[in-house]
Image: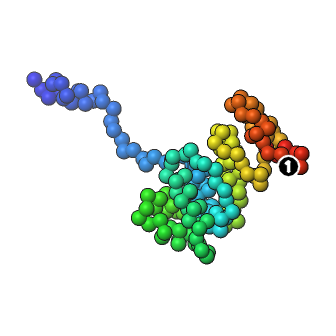
Amino acid sequence: MSSSDQPGGALANADRPRRTARLPVRRAPSLARELLQGILLQPGLARSLALPPMPDPSADAAALSAVVGLCGTAAGELTAAGIVQFFIGTPHEAAVADALATAEDQALTPDLAEERVKAGMARYWQQAERAGTARAPLDVASTPEERERMRQLDFVRGVDGAAASIAQNGVETR
């Protein structure tokens, strides 16, 4: 009996698909990572940010919360290098370093980072409102269509629309 006739011999191996080297898996971009990149390039922006509760359990979201917390409580000016150094040896080290490296690879300018942070925060609040986890502050702009959508979602959820919205000068803002 030859080795090719035995179970597990050469013929059995010929029917198996060959294993190929797997390429590293690329993560999908996340809104938390985009915000983290922008804040690393413009740490001063974090002082004026109000982040909604984050149901996202990712490392990027946790690092974003930690970086915003650091920037909000730090005395004096922060730099990206100083933030990275602060998080060395913490669970956020890899996410912060990766976000900064990606921002540098993408050649993000401070002005573009500021635009992305402002647009990203508006999207983040919109997602939190749609999920029913938080209400956006009044300074976060929304369209009339989005306000109507939120009114309908509140109705479906059984939330009292008068309690959910805030009226100022007789004008419903949310």
Residue 158 in picture, x, y percent from top left: 70, 30
Q: How many marks?
A: 1
Element assignment for label 1: strand
Identity of the residue drawn at 89% across and 45% down: 170
Q: Position of residue 107 (x, y in %)?
A: 61, 64
- What is the three-letter code of the residue carrying label 1? Gln
In which quadrant will I find the N terminus?
top left
Q: Picture coordinates of residue 118 (x, y %)?
A: 71, 57
Left or right of 63 on screen, residue 157: right
Locate residue 95 relative to residue 133 in the image: left or right: left
Residue 31 can be seen, yes or no: yes
Give the image quarter of residue 56: top right
Which residue is rendered at x = 43% and y = 48% of the image? 24
103 vs 124: above or below:
below
Instruction: Read off the residue under disc 1.
Output: 168
| 25 w.r.t. 1: above or below | below
Q: Is 25 on the left or on the right of 10, as rendered?
A: right
User: Which quarter of the image is occupied by the C terminus?
Assistant: top right
Residue depicted at x 71% and y 48%: 136
Is residue 123 visible in this depiction of the protein?
A: no
